[in-house]
Image: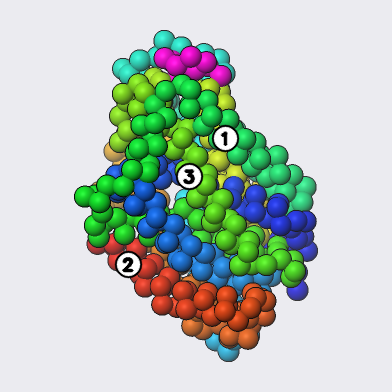
Amino acid sequence: MVAAGGSAHWSSRFTFVMASVGFAVGLGNIWRFPYVTGENGGSTFVLIYLFCAFCIGVPCLVSELLIGRRGQHSPPESMARVAEESGHSRHWRFVGGMGVFTAFAISVTYAVVVGWVLSYLARAVMTGFAGVDAASSSQSFDSLLADSGSMLFWTLVGNILVGVIIFSGVKGGIERAVNIMMPLMFALLIGLSIYNIFAGGFMATLEWLFKPDFSKVGPDTLLAAIGQAFFSIGVAMGGMMTYGSYLPNDFSITRAATTVVFADTLVALLAGFVVFPAVFHFGLDIASGAGLIFQTLPVAFAQMPGGHVFAVLFFVMLSVAGITSMVGLLESATAWCSERFNLHRHMSSVVVVVSVTLCSVASVLSYGAWSDYRLAGKNFNEIAAIPEQILLPLGGLLIAAFAGWFMLRSHSEDELRTNDATYTLWRVLVRYLAVPAIGVILVSGLF
């Protein structure tokens, strides 16, 4: 059998981990994890999150990777083949198709946000946000949202960069890109964190992240930890299953999944040391969500010593996070398009990237000219978010259930190739912890 999109396989474990972490670490990780941590009890939440990440996230990631490697095709065909050889209907392909569709839907709006990052990177290079205050920063971001032409330009720039990487293939494109970009991102995270030790606000960040506050711990804390662990790792979007299809047989799936989850968590914590010291030091709004990046931090950059350099490096780091996530999102769609329509990889990558770009036009216009056009009270961007809210946990639930309950034990044992204790632990966790936990996420998303 041939791996999705061709016979290519990862050349090393390092490359696979870098690609997977690049896919998992998105722009939301940079501000959301540190904020959620502080809002839910500091170090108490971190401990709960680590339990959820390794006892729910790792089993889910292992499940998706082993199905991908077993199936050796795009997510829909991999699911169909693995189900068929386990004596079940090929209709399981719809679970893989759900992941590809969800990834495509997410990438439509995510591409626009990546465009914002690139636009701010250009501003950082040119001005370093010199002279920016709270009012002008907010006005500048509002002006960007109102300028459809500028947003379209930067969205196109981001999509072209992603398209070039995917067009170049697994070894010539994805591997080469992540082997450069991910070490760069880690280096920038560590360097900027060290800078913040001396720039001010670092001790307040440590207290925010790691001081236990049991008064904030309750049922919502557990739900927040489960949700953060599930959504931050990148499962159920087809990308990990596609990346799994490129895994050579001698790669340890359990070791790879554990490493990816550990690295993803490390990035999230380091992001806190990069983002929040400036927020605390300059008394800015820590609860400003995505606006923290585009409206709050530029004010800090304008005031801090060396702010121009810090701003450039920060938005370079964000650009890497955004582009590598987009690559993972669109790689599954590219593999499926190539397989489904018998297209050369080059052509399928062009079709996918052009399709996302055209759909992103609607996302851009929904911030401006189309903001009043609604369906059932929702604009285009709100409708595009529904797959992430509903189909993502549903897909994760079905993948975990399939791997744990429907896939032949001999086949999953053959893929994991680990000792009996480790295999039994994975099987118990995926059956009796991951499936119910993701069910809770799905129900909470619905109601």
Q: Does the magenta stretch mainly form a helix, a strand or a loop?
A: helix
Name the element at disc 3.
Answer: helix
The residue mark sitting in front, 1 or 2, is 1
From the viewer's perspective, tell me whether residue 399 is left or right of residue 354: left
Identify the residue shown where x is 64% and y is 51%: 19
Residue 81 picture location, percent across and down: 63, 78
What segment carries the magenta color? 301-309
Quadrant the N terminus occupies: bottom right
In the image shown, does 290 or 285 lie closer to the viewer?
285
Identify the residue shown where x is 21% and y is 50%: 215
How is this picture coloured? rainbow
Task: Please check the rendered image and state whether residue 304 is part of the magenta-colored stretch, yes or no.
Answer: yes
Residue marked by disc 1: 190
The residue mark sitting in front, 3 or 1, is 1
- Look at the image and tell me whether residue 89 can be seen: no
The residue mark sitting in front, 2 or 3, is 3
Q: How many marks?
A: 3
Task: Please check the rendered image and state whether residue 218 is part of the magenta-colored stretch, yes or no.
Answer: no
Residue marked by disc 3: 268
Q: Amino acid at mark 1?
A: Ile
Q: Amino acid at mark 2?
A: Val
Residue marked by disc 2: 440
Identify the residue shown where x is 64% and y is 42%: 182
Tag 1 near tag 2, CB within 8 Å:
no
